[in-house]
Amino acid sequence: MGTVPGRWFAETMVEKGGTAATPLLRAEGVRKIYRTGAVEVEALRGLDLEVDAGELVAVMGPSGSGKTTLLNCLSGLDDIDGGRVTLGGVDLFAMPDARRTEHRARTMGFVFQAFNLIPVFTAVENVELPLLLVGVAPAQARRRAADMLERVGLEARGAHRPNELSGGEQQRVTIARALVARPAIVWADEPTGNLDSEMAAQVMDLLRTLNRDEGQTIILVTHDPGIGAAAGRLIRMRDGALLSDERRTPAGAPAPSTPSTFPAAAVPPAPSAPEAPDALTSAG
Ligand SMILES: Nc1ncnc2c1ncn2[C@@H]1O[C@H](COP(=O)(O)OP(=O)(O)OP(=O)(O)O)[C@@H](O)[C@H]1O
C-alpha cells in the first residue's frame, strides 16, 4: 500500500512518542555564517521557526535579510553552523549528506531559479523526473506526471519543451515537478519573480489552490506585498532574524497566533504515492 510522505511523518512521529501537536518543520537556534576570506557574514542569527502541515507561509524582508539563506538551510540544501532543523521529527543535519539528499528528494519539492527545467526534456519528462529518481516505475511516473500537468492546466502541453512554453507556463511546469511526488513541503524562492503581473497572479492562484484544496505545505520567499498578504502566514525577516510572524484567517484578516498542530486533515490523499523508504523510517 502506498504511503503519503505527510502521512508517513504523522505516523512516524506518533511511533516516536510524538504528539499530534508536533510541527511538521521545526528550526531551533539555526545559525548560518558565510566566510569569504577574512570577512564573515552571519546570515541567520539563531533563528527559531515552526511550520505546521498545511500552512502557506510567505517570507518577506529587505534584500540581504536572509530569506534565501533561510530556505536553503531549513530545507537542508546548505549546511548550518549551529542549531537544529527537524522535518517530521527527523533531524536533517544528523544524517550523512548522501542520506540527506535522498531524504530531500522524497520529502521536499523546490520551485527555485537554480532548479530550472531541463531544456531538452519535454514538460511531461521534466515533471516525471523526481518520481523516476525515487524509483517509481516509468509507466506510473508518466501517468502521475500527466495528471499533475492537468492539475496545473497544462494537459495539452506535455510534449512541449520549455522553450516552446511561455514564462508562466514554464513556472507552472516547475510547480508540477515540485509537487508530483506529493512532498511534505514545497519551497519556492520568488516563484513569480520573473513573470508579468497576470502570469504572477495565475501562478499564485495555483499555489493557493494546491494549499487550500490539498493541504500542501508551501513556504515561499517573495518581494511582492500582494503575495505576502494573500498567504495564510506572513513572516518578515531583518538581519538574519525574524522580525514578525503573523497568521491570517482565510478572509485575510490577521489572526492571533495559534498553537502548533499537525492536522490529519491537512495530509493529502495520494493512493499512488511512493512507499516510505525503510532507510528513512528508522532515521532520527
Ligand atoms: N554565498 C555567499 N557568500 C557570502 N555571503 C553570502 C552568500 N550568500 C548570501 N550571503 C550574504 O548573506 C546575507 C543574506 O543573504 P540572502 O541571499 O539570504 O538574502 P535575501 O534576503 O534572500 O536577499 P535578496 O532579497 O536580495 O535575495 C547577505 O548579507 C548576503 O550578502
Image (spheres, grey):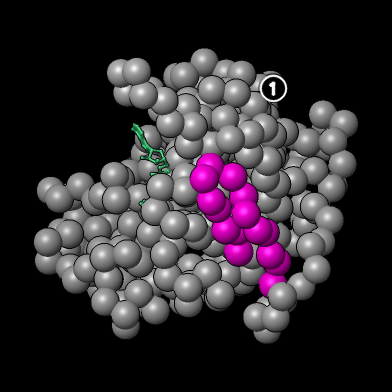
The residue carrying mark 1 is 284
Q: Position of residue 199 (x, y in %)?
A: 31, 77
Q: Is mark 1 within 8 Å of ligand 1?
A: no
Q: What amino acid type should be assigned to the residue bearing mark 1?
A: Gly
What secondary structure is found at the residue carrying circle 1?
loop
Ligand 1 shows up in the quarter that is top left
The answer to whether residue 14 is left or right of residue 162 is: right
Residue 45 belongs to magenta span: no
- Give the magenta-colored segment's residue range: 234-248
Q: Is residue 201 above or below residue 258?
A: below
Query: Front-most of 136 and 32?
Result: 32
Residue beneath the point at 54% across and 37% down? 44
* Quarter location, residue 200: bottom left
> Horizontally, is 9 left or right of 140 in the view?
right
Which of the image's four quarters has the C terminus? Answer: top right
Say if the magenta span includes residue 244.
yes
Q: Residue at x 60, y 64 (%)?
A: 234
- Residue drawn at (29%, 44%) of the image: 114
Residue 85: give x, y in percent of width and height: 63, 32
Q: Nearer the viewer, residue 166 or 225?
A: 225
Q: Can see residue 275?
A: yes
State how many labels appear.
1
User: Residue 265: percent from the left, percent from the top?
Assistant: 75, 61
